[in-house]
Amino acid sequence: MEIQFIDLAAQYRALKQDVDARIAKVLEHGRYIMGPEVREMEQALEARTGAPHCISVASGTEALLIALMAIGVSAGDEVITTSFTFVATAEVIALLGAVPVFVDVEPDTCNIDANLIEAAITPRTKAIIPVSLYGQVADMDAINAIAARHPGITVIEDAAQSFGATYRGKASCNVSRIACTSFFPSKPLGCYGDGQMNPLDMPAILAPVINDVADYSKGNRLVTGEAFKRIPKIRFFGNSALSLLTKIASGYWGVADSQTGYTAINAKALAAIDWDHMYKRYGQPNDLLVRLNIAEMRVVDVPVEPVYNVGEKSGIRVRKVLFSIGWLIVRLFFYRLKEKYIIRDFHPLVFFYAFGGATALVGLLFLVRTILLWFTQGSMPEMSFLVTLFSFSISFNAIGFAFWFDYQANRHLNPPITHRDVTHRQAPDPIDP
Ligand SMILES: Cc1ncc(COP(=O)(O)O)c(C=O)c1O
């Protein structure tokens, strides 16, 4: 008899009705990215674990990485953990340039031996990552007590293999300052698939921030050779148009695909942004770019592979969004001009914008006059036509110069990166414990 490691099909058959109904609902509303189910799941996780805040990210590995970045782990720091785990636990420590310090496990539970941790602590220790394996939570009281004796050390439970377990009446995921779990299909609580992003793109997005080349780095799906073929046309052109307008509004002339959600940010930029007043809907990334520019943060654009499901449709109501985001971008443009070039510093490009705007208005009025006279008198009013042409040409010149000055003033905030060839990447190792 063959016994499967994990029989997900049997599990599906048992829950088929419920699962099919919920999947159908998602397909109907079409909001696959950050749709209402995401918050619903986070709330269910908060209720289940008792943890005050549950935040979903792309994978357990990414959760560990984000947790370490959030507490400021960087090159040269040490993080205590165990080698008896999946590679992700130690890999994210190394990815940040920090050193994983391995402590042995208890022979009966295979979890980190809390009695050996204190001896491994040095002035460089920033965190302890106990891994709760086989559904057994590590000895968290003892581990938390050690961290409490060493201010500056944060405990992060790797609860990828222990979701649903309890420890002295408390749920795993709620027994340390931070906890990370995984919904890999074979985990205690598995999902269908492996989260969102092509994992091969993650290092490229993180590298500029980790190497301090940029304060904020973002994916750009529009620049790979395949982009035009792979991205549904309406999204490609819509996104390109928004990107162009966002360049003008934000001053990041070298940044495109403004709407992408794949980003990395450092602590300095995080602290520089007023998140409470950030636009909360589809225009959020555009608002963020403008705020980053005002705060003089360096931003880079990293080519990433566009990933779309077969027949995937956007849930965005184009007509409604066009109006709201168009108006937002106009407001952001004036906000940045005021903050950056009038209040914090002064740049004569504001005169060029003002002159360009005023002459465009004159051109527009004379265009209307020309058309009206042409229709009522039956012949083209030459003077009116010449004034229209003259006004528009001055306006284009003035606005063109303003763009150029803005581009020059922001070049240092757009550091160049070496673009990657996304067609020759290796497939990730699919093995999971
Ligand atoms: C202990 C442990 N930590 C972290 C991870 C990483 O989780 P994910 O596969 O969701 O990235 C896994 C499983 O893969 C794991 O077993």
Image (tube, rainbow, N blue to C red):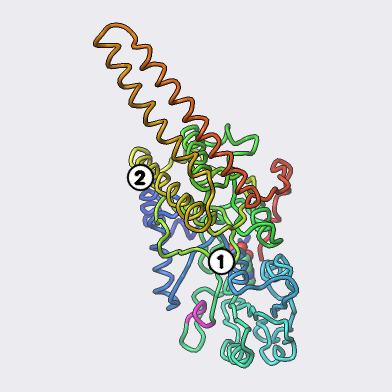
Residue toward you, 227 or 46: 227
Q: Which residues are magenta?
A: 171-176
Question: Which amino acid type is shown beneath numbered disc 1?
Answer: Ser
Residue 259, horizontal then vertical, whole percent: 50, 47
Determine if the magenta segment contains residue 321.
Answer: no
Q: Which mark is residue 182?
A: 1
Q: How many marks?
A: 2
Q: Secondary structure at mark 2?
A: helix
Residue 209, horizontal then vertical, whole percent: 65, 60
Q: Which mark is residue 324?
A: 2
Pointer 1 residue Cβ closer than 8 Å to ligand 1: yes
The reply, left or right, for residue 392 in relation to residue 93 is: left
Residue toward you, 46 or 148: 148
Q: Is residue 85 above or below residue 8?
A: below
Whether residue 5 appears in this view of the structure is no
Q: Which mark is residue 260?
A: none
Q: Indicate the quadrant of ligand 1 in the picture.
A: bottom right
Residue at point 41% right, 44% down? Answer: 330
Residue 278, horizontal then vertical, whole percent: 42, 59
Residue at point 54% right, 82% down? Answer: 176
Residue 227, horizontal then vertical, whole percent: 59, 36
Pointer 2 residue Cβ closer than 8 Å to ligand 1: no
The reply, left or right, for residue 374 in relation to residue 341 is: left
Question: Which amino acid type is shown beneath numbered disc 2?
Answer: Ser
Quadrant of res 431? bottom right
